[in-house]
Image (cartoon, helix red, strand yellow):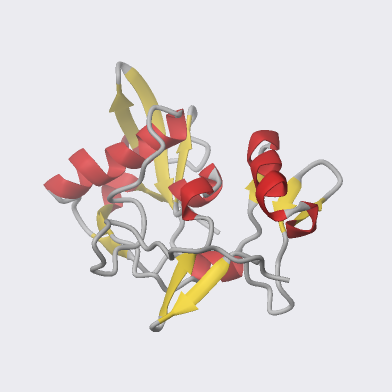
């Protein structure tokens, strides 16, 4: 798969299709794994040879994927792993996928390289809009760097009172 540099993206918006939760396994760091295990039990996770993952259902989707009103949402939005928070973007210290000039993004005096996974249906190609370049992308980078945890532009919005999809009570999926 060839990742696309951010300067080729006009805008991005989560359309709550759930494809990211169906197509990819979520790798967890130890802290994320521990939070999920303490809240939902170890049975909601799986360990690989050298990685920890969120358990997947028989259909391949994330065990925390919720579907309501034909929109998909994260059942653990308030503790969503960083890999999920920044998808479909890859924020790297080096231009690992080429196109260094098109992928370069300056944040706090540091040059990072930002790419997008073309599998995301919320990506619109073209020249970056002001909103995307100055607000949405910056939020992704801030989350990636650990400078913020709350999501406003970088998650699904379905017109509810909050700027992200949230379901009042969470239940264990077995």
**Foreground of the two, 69 or 102:** 69
The answer to whether residue 80 is above or below residue 166 is: above
**Residue 150 can be seen, yes or no:** yes
The answer to whether residue 43 is above or below residue 152 is: below
Could you tell me which residue is drawn at 70 percent across and 44 percent down?
Answer: 38
Spot the residue most to the bottom: 70
Spot the residue most to the front: 169
Q: Position of residue 41 (x, y in %)?
A: 75, 53
Q: Position of residue 147 (x, y in %)?
A: 39, 27
**Foreground of the two, 84 or 162:** 162
Could you tell me which residue is drawn at 31 percent across and 32 percent down?
Answer: 105
Q: Quadrant of the N terminus?
A: bottom right
Looking at the image, residue 159 sits to the left or right of residue 99; the answer is left
Could you tell me which residue is drawn at 52 percent across and 49 percent down?
Answer: 80
The answer to whether residue 27 is above or below residue 118 is: above
* Res 43 quadrant in image: bottom right
Spot the residue most to the right: 49
Q: Position of residue 53 (x, y in %)?
A: 72, 52
Looking at the image, residue 29 sits to the left or right of residue 117; the answer is right
The answer to whether residue 121 is above or below residue 68 is: above
Could you tell me which residue is drawn at 21 percent across and 41 percent down?
Answer: 135
**Residue 102 can be seen, yes or no:** no
**Foreground of the two, 102 or 82:** 82
Spot the residue most to the top: 109
């Amino acid at each position: 798969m060839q990742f696309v540099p951010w300067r080729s993206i006009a805008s991005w918006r989560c359309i709550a299709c759930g494809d990211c939760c169906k197509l990819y396994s979520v790798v967890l760091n130890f802290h994320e794994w521990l939070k999920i295990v303490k809240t939902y039990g170890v049975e909601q996770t799986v360990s690989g040879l050298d990685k920890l993952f969120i358990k997947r259902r028989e259909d391949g989707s994330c065990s925390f994927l919720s579907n309501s009103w034909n929109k998909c949402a994260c059942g653990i939005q308030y503790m969503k792993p960083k890999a999920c928070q920044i998808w479909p973007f890859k924020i790297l210290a080096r231009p690992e996928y080429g196109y260094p000039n098109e992928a370069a993004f300056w944040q706090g005096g540091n040059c990072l390289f930002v790419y997008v996974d073309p599998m995301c249906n919320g990506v619109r190609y073209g020249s970056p809009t002001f909103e995307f370049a100055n607000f949405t992308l910056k939020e992704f980078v801030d989350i990636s760097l650990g400078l913020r945890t709350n999501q406003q532009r970088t998650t699904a919005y379905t017109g509810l009172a909050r700027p992200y999809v949230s379901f009042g009570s969470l239940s264990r999926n077995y």
